[in-house]
Image: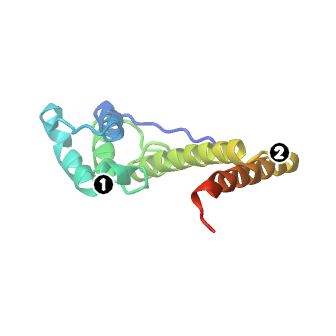
Amino acid sequence: MSRRLVVVDDQALLYLLLWGSNHWLQGTPIPTHRVPERIADLLLSQTTIGWDNLFLGRWSKHWTTLQLQYLQPNHIEVKNKNHGLSLSSNIIRLMWDHYYKEWTTRNKARHGKDADDKAQRRLEKAHRSIRDLYDLKPKCSL
């Protein structure tokens, strides 16, 4: 996994990205009256697509359009790391890299990190299954 530099020059976009994601993660509605008019279409579009879909790589095209619209009038050089399409791609890649790291960490914790550890986890699981079967014995009639 490579480290990618993600540059969001437009603070309103960065704020909406963090704010919208946080509201979705917390299960609270996004108060639309607090959004600047120039990004209202983006909010509506991403809300229609679904903020959960943002985490799956489904971003509104408004993200890239607004980033580019911010760069040009502010005389910020458009580079690979900051232009709209690259920006959303890099953020998606960064999130997926993080998900993969969390997934592998969880799997190592649950299933073991090496052959001995994995064997020990399988043995513990077998013991739990046997105990569960013995616990069921009084409930079964022959």
Q: Which residue is mark 2?
A: 117
In this rendering, the answer to whether 34 lies above or below 142 is: above
Residue extending farthest front: 142
Q: Position of residue 37 (x, y in %)?
A: 13, 38
Q: Which residue is mark 1?
A: 60
Q: Is residue 105 visible?
A: yes
In this rendering, the answer to whether 11 lies above or below 71 is: above
Q: Position of residue 96 (x, y in %)?
A: 54, 49
Q: Residues within 10 Å of mark 2 (few under 14, many from 20)?
A: some
Pick whichever of labels 2 and 1 is earlier in the sequence.
1
**Residue at disc 2, secondary structure:** helix
Q: CA distance from mark 2 to mark 1?
A: 44 Å
Residue extending farthest right: 116
Q: Position of residue 115 (x, y in %)?
A: 86, 51
Residue appearing at x 17%, y 40% in the figure: 38
Q: Residues within 10 Å of mark 1 (few under 14, many from 20)?
A: many
